[in-house]
Amino acid sequence: MFRTLAPRTPEDDAPKQAVPAPASTDAPGGDRLKAAVAAWVASADDEEPESGTESEPETGSESGSGAESASEPAASEEPADASDDATVDEAVGEAVDEPADEAVDAPVEGKAPAESWFAARKPVEAEKAAARSDAGSDAGTDVEDAPAAAAPASGARPASGGSTESPDSGSAADEPVADEPVDQPTAMFKIVRPPVAPVVDQPTTALKLPQSLREDYDSERTSTFVPLRADIPAERKAERKAEEAQAARQAQVARQAQAAPKAPVPAPEPAGGAPEAPQAPKAPQAAEAAPAQASAPVPPASLVEAERTRQQPLPPLPPLDLLAELTNTPPPKPNALRTTARRVRIWTPLVVLLLIVFAIVQMVRPLPDPVLTLSASPTFTFEGGELQMPWPNEGQGAVEVEGVGSMGMYGPQKPAPIASVTKTMTAYVILRDHPLKGSQKGPEIEIDQKAAEQGKAEHESTAAVQEGQTYTQKELLELLMIPSANNVARLLARWDAGSEAAFVEKMNAAAKDLGMTQSTYTDPSGLLDSTVSTPQDQLKLAKAVMQYDVFREIVNMPNVTVDGIPGRIENNNNILLKPGVSGIKTGSSTPAGGNLLWAANTIVDGENRRILGIVMGSKDAADLGKKLQLAIDNSYLLIQQAQKDVTSAVVVRKGQVLGHIDDGLGGLTPVVATKELKAIGWPGLKVKLELNSGGKAVPHSGKAGDVIGQVSIGTGVGKVSAPVALEKDLVEPGFDKKLTRLG
């Protein structure tokens, strides 16, 4: 339906006067008007012929019947429901109320009336209605009242171009109407929607037959979902089927009992046996309503309320059972073979993948460093039984072959006064701080007054030096070690450290550096009995100081001549006159007794071997001089035995397998000595073999004969060694060893 809306004006909002509608004299005429309007509403979208082309019936009765007949098809086209009645009543009310509204919308004086969509639409509607009603009715019928009432009260032009009369004034408004088209507002298209039943949100229902039809169709019943359970035994399946069949039969009997008609309950007889009074006949309306109620269909229960399932939720199924339900194929019966095969199929790919990753990791890992290991006996014992040394009966002492080891010791090995043996440490500190090489004699040192005055002392050994004289460092060392001059020891201390106390501190520091843990120095000369030491500490000092060539030269001199001092100075150590003896220092005092720190040499296999020893605390004599001589005599006995017993022996033969190279993965490559190796020792001595790479890294591969290390015996100057080489080719570990290594 098309409607044109005009802009709303203030006059439209003004209160309107109610205009009474013309009374209808014929009620059936009003019904016919409603029927006509309903037919018009139903055919509003269809194209209608012009009013002038319609054929007019001759009688009003025919018109009335035609209007009724025209309304019947329109009413029969749509279902007669509440929405259709509302549409017809709305349309009729709109048509009836329009004259009253339009009468109020009379033009205001002095203002041109504005055309609205009511004025533009209603003349057309009134003209169509008049064409239908006037065709078969007289001027005095009620159908004429409808077009007359529908005529606009305003000055809008009718569709036929004539004039329109106002029902209030009774005079015609002869206003000219232009034929040109009038610019109308934008039209609004309104579509009459077909009636739609209200949507009610209801639960999902199942389609079921009515209760009356279920008796004949027993198969139409509620189904129960039964999942496939292949793991249920056959006996359990039979029991479950029997239970389900029994439940179905009980449900069927219950439904049949509900569907069977109930027998009428007889009314109780009145008291006294009086006959029941006849009841009055029911009204015709009640009699007619009973068949209607009986014939009305009753909706099934399934449409009223949703059917609820009785199936309980099941726990999740194993993968094989779920696959069996999806494929509707029961799983095979489990057994040990199938279980084993399934596990093999599952785990085999994972195991293979892990093995591949493990192999790759093993191949890219770096190889362990090869290690040179000694496989031969680590020790060698010299033949000849136990060593027998002529140890003194008093004091304490020790003997050692330099670079080989100790030949033994005797006595308590406790700190004791060492007298002038202290001057060995004084010479060591001077040479350490002011070394002399070759023929060097060192700087010139002037004799001070204190040294000159101390040289005149009667109860200690001194050198007759004069104040102002100058002597070289070597000359003063000769005066220190050969005549054992105490005044020269103090002079060298002041020259080196600035004072005697400072020099003593340096002496103790040097002892600590050499590992002389049981030695204490309190003066540079040894005159004080507070300077103490042990045989082992003095042998450590002897090995250190004998490394200086100038010192070995000085202590091996039986006598010496020094410019500025008259005559030849004799060495107190007369043991130097014995063959093979080369020093070192004597020392004697009342608290210390006779002491001698000595050095001797022996030739073994054409090489000179040094033997060091000390005898301390020789007191078994009448005077001090004899005590010192006793110490010298005891020392010489030890020297003679040591020189006799020190020998050599073949410890390693050429080509002997001494060890192997371990590649860290189980591979062993033997190594052999390239020459014969002899060791220095004495009867009963055990020497230790050491196999090393000589400070180089052991290779991962090599050819037979390649030198890869050395074998050695002893330490220091007495150390002997021989090279070792590969007995066969050294190759890197293979793929199998790399793959199977775990460390």
Image: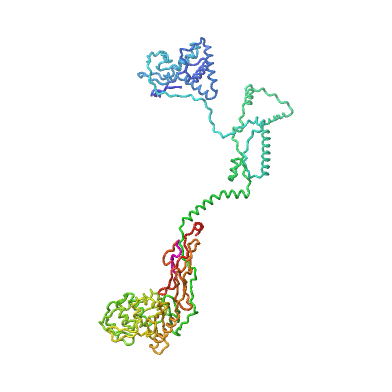
Q: Is residue 708 magenta?
A: yes
Q: Kindly indicate the quadrant of the structure image that contains residue 716.
A: bottom left
Q: Kindly indicate the quadrant of the structure image that contains residue 409.
A: bottom left
Above or below, 516 relative to 83: below
Q: Residue at x 47, y 82 (%)?
A: 388
Query: What is the image's colouring?
Result: rainbow
Residue lying farthest to the bottom in this orientation: 622
319 or 338: nearer the viewer: 338
215 or 65: nearer the viewer: 215
311 or 338: nearer the viewer: 338
Residue 142 position within the rendered picture, expressed as x and y whole percent measured from the top left: 50, 14
Residue 477 position within the rendered picture, expressed as x and y whole percent measured from the top left: 32, 80
Residue 709 position within the rendered picture, expressed as x and y whole percent measured from the top left: 43, 67
Residue 266 position within the rendered picture, expressed as x and y whole percent measured from the top left: 71, 29
Residue lying farthest to the left in this orientation: 468
Asked if residue 607 lies left or right of residue 321, the reply is left
Above or below, 90 relative to 317: above
Q: Kindly indicate the quadrant of the structure image that contains residue 124.
A: top left
Q: Which residues are magenta?
A: 701-711
Q: Residue at x 46, y 57 (%)?
A: 365
